[in-house]
Image: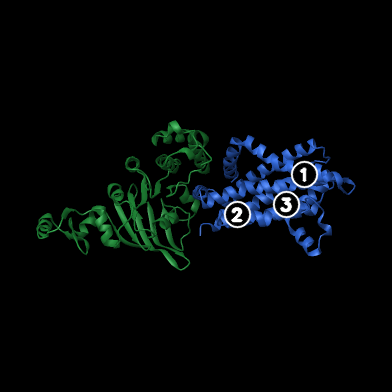
Chain colours: A blue, B green
Amino acid sequence: MLYDIWTVFWREWLVLRRRIGRFILSRMVSPILYLVAFGWGLGRSIQVNQGSYLDFIVPGIIALNSMNISFVSVGSPLNMSRLYHKTLEEYLIAPISSVSFVLGKVLAGALRGLISSVLIIVLAYAFGAHFIINSWFLLALVLNCLVFASMALVAAMIMNSHEDMANFNTYVLLPMSFLCATFFVPDHLPTVLNWMIQILPLTHASVALRAIATSGAVPVLPLVIMFGYTIMFIGTGVWLMEKVRE
Amino acid sequence: MIHIEGLIKKFDDRLAVNNLCLDIKKGEVFGLLGPNGAGKTTTIRMLTMLTKPTAGSIMIDGCDHGEQCIKAVIGVVPQHFNLDIELTAWENLELHGRLHHMPAEKRKRRIKELLEYVELDDRAHEMVQKFSGGMKRRLMIARALLHHPKVLFLDEPTVGLDPQVRRRLWELIRHLKEEGLTVLLTTHYIEEAESLCQRVAILEKGKLIALDTPAALCQRLGAYVVEWDEPAGFKTRFFADRTLAAEFAATLTTTTTLRQTNLEDAFVELTGRKVVG
């Protein structure tokens, strides 16, 4: 099984390696915009918890960016491969298990999310932000990438058109990017909205990353919740892969 | 080599394959014919483990349980081009070899050998996106053969290809048969089935309506056919021998053709519809 996971991952790595330069350049655009607009521009006049706004939003930007990249790296390509290119059949015909396929794809998506996060961390330092990075930070980041890479796999297996896939982005990812404790603390939002925000996985990523980055504290509950989401999406993904044959 | 019993596939209320039973021998090139929507592709999809049958059993090379066991002995060339366009020809084959757990050395040797076999060795490191239809089809055949399968499934292998490429692929398929491979192909082109297959099965609305050698299917109708035009439409009549056919043709006053019966005649008589290529 490990060999099969590696095979699925290897294919993604081959494609990524071929365009690593372009990948890195394009991934730098939106974090730079966020850092300039919210960190330098808007952030100059805002203070959060006695710290600079730039320091406050960097973990949020890392959370939302790793979410987006992990999701987009798996979602659209897999959806296209299932519906349009039919390359998914090559895996379905091969003597490998659904678990291997799902894990290979999810790990490859998470890797892309991680590479883009490293870029943001470097950029954030260049912009003068202060934050702590330790192994807990890395764990929270990896978990966030896994949550959204596996969520993308589930979405790609369910959505029956490219347009639906784009709609999923608009209705699910975009609201999360702004609401899930990325740019502000959602505590003073109306109770029902706040309660809904607390359910969403990205909130826990932002909270965990920020807690570690500012004080080095280990937020156990958010990490457990993210782990739970990962397991749930991977399980659903495997189930959908089995069902695709019916 | 392939043993199918009571195979049924239902999509909601529609019966796509209705109680299909077939026995295909080792080393045989077997054709699955039928009008559009007859259930050919669904049958192939079930045999290649892409679709689960509603009922019935499939046995390929002694494997009758466990998808993984069957998957290891079959090679599949689907109807649509499903090569990975983000990879080169070589990488497409390498991915397949890895998915089929071929050891690195053996894989490398086999990829080289097959690229030469399908005459794509000089294009090995080009992206497949740039390939023509014929090249893609040849690469797909190479991919299907990579892990030394015992049965090859070809779903409409020559659709959309120009005549030269088609003939080249026919040569390739004949060559595979000589090497002892069992081939099951579906086709719309009657002449393709006639020239390649030892036996053909004709499906209609998911049911097997005829199963025999192309020659025997033609013989059933009569060895000769007379065709002529009438104001009401095109007419055909079958005769057991040429003299009778000629005598009948002599009585007609319009433009008349007298020729040997072919598989297309048998197909049209059996299915009642003209096949479109």
Residue at numbered disc 2? A165
Q: Kindly identify the amino acid type of the residue bearing the numbered disc 2.
A: Met
Q: Is residue A226 visible?
A: no
Q: Residue at x 28, y 62 (%)?
A: B270
Instruction: List x then y, in percent, for residue A69.
Output: 67, 46
Q: Is residue B131 above or below residue B76?
A: above
Q: Are marks 1 and 3 in contact (CB under 8 Å)?
A: no
Disc nearer the start of the sequence (2/3) = 2
Q: Residue at x 10, y 60 (%)?
A: B251
Subunit ID for the residue under disc 2 = A
Q: Give the Cα separation between the discs numbered 1 and 3.
A: 15 Å
Residue at numbered disc 3? A177
Instruction: List x then y, in percent, for residue A82.
Output: 53, 51
Q: Secondary structure at mark 2?
A: helix
Subunit ID for the residue under disc 3 = A
Q: Secondary structure at mark 3?
A: helix
Question: Would residue B93 be found to the left or right of residue A25 on screen?
Answer: left
Q: Kindly identify the amino acid type of the residue bearing the numbered disc 1.
A: Ala
Q: Quadrant of residue B19?
A: bottom left
Instruction: List x then y, in percent, for residue A114.
Output: 70, 42
Q: Nearer the viewer, residue A233 or A196?
A: A196
- The residue most toward the right is A50
Q: Give the Cα separation between the discs numbered 2 and 3.
A: 17 Å
Residue at numbered disc 1? A37
